[in-house]
Image (cartoon, rainbow, N blue to C red):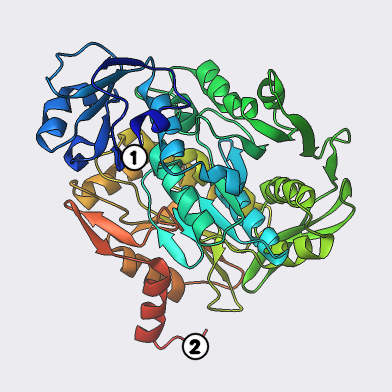
Amino acid sequence: MKLEKILEKTQYTLLSGSLDTDIDDIVYDSRKAKEGTAFVCMTGAQADGHKFIQGAVDNGTKVIIIEHEVDMIPGVTYIQMDDTRAGLAYMSAALFEYPAERLTVIGLTGTKGKTTTTFMIKSILEKAGKKVGIIGTIGVFMGEQYIQTHNTTPESYDIQYYFKKMADMGCDTVVMEVSSQALKLNRTAGIMFDYAIYTNLSPDHIGENEHKDMEEYIYCKSLLFKQCRHGIFNVDDEHSHDMMEGAVCDITTYGFDKKADLIAGEVKYLIEPGFIGIEYESSGIIDGNVKVNTPGKFSAYNSMAAMCVASFMGADYENMLAALNEVAVRGRVEPVKISDRFNLLIDYAHNAMSLESLLTTIKDYEPGRIVCLFGCGGNRSKLRRYEMGEISGKYADLSVITADNSRYEDVMDIIEDIKTGIHKTTGKYVVIPDRKEAIKYCIENAEDGDIILLCGKGHEDYQEINGERHPFDERVIINEILTEIDWKG
């Protein structure tokens, strides 16, 4: 594709060279530069791409996209833009021939509930005959293919690449989590979302290299509703009106508020062997009884958001009920049925806020005991360890303190920090540093009516120790343990 075509939706200045240049690919990592690529210089929290221009040229690239003045190398085409991050987004869309135009694009933003809601939407739409891809925290799903990613919302180039792959393999819909950082850094620039969902907002991602304050966090979240056709909002959330302010989309609301377009009635808590969920009556744009295979009142909110968008896309009530009754999200209060006497759940809760939300949700089910197994990551804030220890000590009947991703720290040092927090409470705890042994302990010592929570790993299938990732999928580990102890249930 000619450089001029790739730049067609950007604002730029040609500083040197020619637009009549063939481009095979776009890169934003100088190490991937080669002949036929355009190198986009972006300034990030850790590095400034402008410092790596010479390396990109040495690797063969002859087109450089810059934001600020640099010493220009003879024989190289230089393009200047006010914002190269936005430029990368528009250029990538052009390179892949605007794949979003071949898809129904659904975006979700909010502090909690995005991942679960994306899978609820996927499940309902697939029941209705759609072919759905996902981009989110757990990774990218397209057909049978799964790609692990590092960010909730990948870089703009990668988003457009995945869009094209999905469209080429026959997907008609993509559901993606849109983080505040992605909106701040223009990763979704140029995408017109057909539907955008707001789940909720609470203080998170505030600090160095993220958002300077809550005001900026709210503003960045709200940007999604300035690039969508239909906005769907949790009207019960105190910040929903901040999200709606300046929105350019049609507005639909959901919640327990009687003024919402989709209203949930009183939630009933359901627990059976291998099933822990909720039931409620919906009214408004969808009337009927809804049973959801994930626990807690927040599951009503997640399912309402999913039902709203699915109803607009033509899914019928039966599709919705069938999907919500069986949906399971890997690592999000994921049940693992091994006994009729107690329930075992895997969850990604890995900070104080998510752990408190999980534990208070499970308390609503009035279990015999809550057994909370968790650890904390190495080379991370000690404050998180103190807080998680205190939260587990406060809400769990028994805390089982063990390893998570210790990285370059000693597991016992991390555990001592966790104990500092738990000692602020009267909560009972045991320390079992080996995570497999800790899970085994929980199973062998389970009591009737227990809900056992394996927290922190969720969808992850590894443990990171001394810079190496070792296979550790808790579902596999549980099966190994059951075989080793000749489990009878």
Left or right of 262: which side holds 199?
A: left
Quadrant of the image for the N terminus? top left
Residue visible at 79% across and 35% down in the picture: 252
Q: Residues within 10 Å of mark 1 (few under 14, many from 20)?
A: some
Which percent across, then down, holds residue 203?
53, 27
Q: Residue at x 23, y 26 (%)?
A: 49
Tag in front: 1 or 2:
2
* Residue 342 in the image, given as x and y percentages of width and height: 58, 72
In this rendering, position of residue 259 left or right of residue 357: right
Which residue appears farthest toward the top when viewing the image?
A: 69
Kind of residue at disc 2: Lys
Query: In the image shown, does 199 or 177 lie closer to the viewer?
Result: 177
| Nearer-the-camera pick, 424 or 415 | 415
Please report the residue visible at 58 percent of the width from the left and 25 percent of the height from the top: 223
Which label belongs to residue 488?
Answer: 2
Q: Residue furthest front?
A: 20
Q: Is residue 387 above or below residue 468?
A: above
Task: Report if residue 48 is visible in the image.
Answer: no
Amino acid, disc 1? Thr
Identify the residue at horizontal 54%, vertical 16% (top origin).
Answer: 215
The vertical placement of 186 against 157, above or below, is above
Residue 420 has which mark? Answer: 1
